[in-house]
Image (cartoon, rainbow, N blue to C red):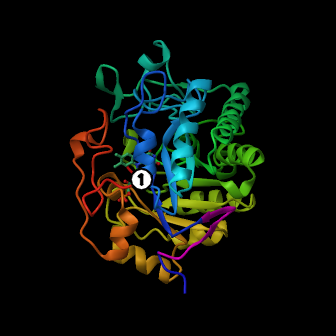
Amino acid sequence: MTTLFSAGTIGAISVSNRVVMAPLTRARADMEGLPSRYAAQYYAQRASAGLIITEATNISKQARGYAYTPGIYTDAQIVAWREITEEVHRAGGKIVLQLWHTGRIAHSSLHDGKPPVAPSEIQAGDMVFTEDGAARPSMPRALELDEIPSIIDDYVLAARHARAAGFDGVEVHAANAYLLDQFIRDSTNRRTDAYGGSVENRTRLPFEVTKAVADVFGPDRVGVRLSPITRAVGDTPLDSDPVGTYKRMAERLGTLGLAYLHCVEGQTQGDNAATSFDFQSLRRAFGGSYIANNSYDRTLAVEAVATGHADMIAFGRPYIANPDLVERLRAQAPMAAGDEKTFYGGGAAGYVDYPALDGVTAND
Ligand SMILES: Cc1cc2nc3c(=O)[nH]c(=O)nc-3n(C[C@H](O)[C@H](O)[C@H](O)COP(=O)(O)O)c2cc1C
């Protein structure tokens, strides 16, 4: 029987257990998009995860939405990420890069005062981090139809760079109301061209991006993240028919032979039991391996893998303060709580100084 601790494969990637480190933005990069100098240590400390998904990483300068987030569009960034993948591999782990374009959830101060780009000219609420602190995202401009191929090209280039940096694969971030999800949802997409209107048109860009990225890495090293019922980021309203829309998205992605589909199974960081959305229908529509996320604890995770609900379980917040999460789950040991004040920004504190259970920081 497969358990949370069974080895296996996800696409072409062999994994030593079914625990995934979920993507976690920590806002410790510099303004050139170079990952934190502590990032290699941070990720290597967590290398006992079956799979690490990195923090969301900007595919281009235009993709940036928040200050102090890393990129994968310059040579220096590739070199820095290579050091990180090598450390993780030395520690026996597997690591994929989450490819990010923030779309309208961005501030013009990151774009020389120019507006960020989005499917349509609809301003996000909520806030993003700038060099001067928190600010409301700027009014975006709608992408012209003839600009869309260059967005796909940016994803392709980012995937090539990720390969050069030694990643085991990439995850296309089509969740949490960022650019690709802005295309999917009719609440943020009012286009009247081939990329707006019908479900087929709204799922077109995420599909085309994923297909193009799969051509770079091989489809079995590419995953996609979706969050059909998450509204928090950018205060983004849901699609008017999340079940129908995301099921079709999953079905289209299923034709590509991808490594996995990764779903945030509720309102991010909320209680999954509060929703009646049937994530198994998404999984069936996709037809391949499935990573479940959102507020999983040990009991729920063990059960989800044992019953076949999911192939792997991604943990986000628990990974901040528990570098040895797999060992703690195995031993049914207590979990440390992370300090929210150091979730975003800063240096080593609250980042690489959470100890493993025996008091020694893992893989130091
Ligand atoms: C500090 C922090 C940063 C996050 N950054 C990302 C990110 O870069 N990309 C992403 O897809 N989700 C991100 N998330 C969402 C998590 O991956 C995850 O979906 C969420 O925390 C729920 O899982 P959990 O209950 O195991 O924490 C972030 C969450 C937190 C708390």
- Crowding at dot 1, Cα within 10 Å, few <14 / some 14-19 / many 20+, comes out as many
Whether residue 272 sits left or right of residue 3 in the image: it is left
The foreground one among 302 and 13 is 13
Q: Amino acid at mark 1?
A: Thr
| Magenta highlight on residue 190 | no
- Which residue matches tag 1? 230
Residue at left 70%, top 28%?
A: 150
Residue at left 37%, top 33%?
A: 28
Residue 308, given in percent of the width and then of the height, sits at 53, 80
Is residue 325 visible in the rendered image? The answer is yes
Q: Secondary structure at mark 1?
A: loop
Residue at left 54%, top 51%?
A: 90
Question: Which of the 4 quarters of the picture holds residue 131?
Answer: top left
Q: Residue furthest top?
A: 112
The foreground one among 277 and 96 is 96
| Magenta highlight on residue 7 | yes
Q: Which residues are the magenta region?
A: 5-14
Is residue 24 visible in the rendered image? The answer is no
Residue at left 37%, top 68%?
A: 327
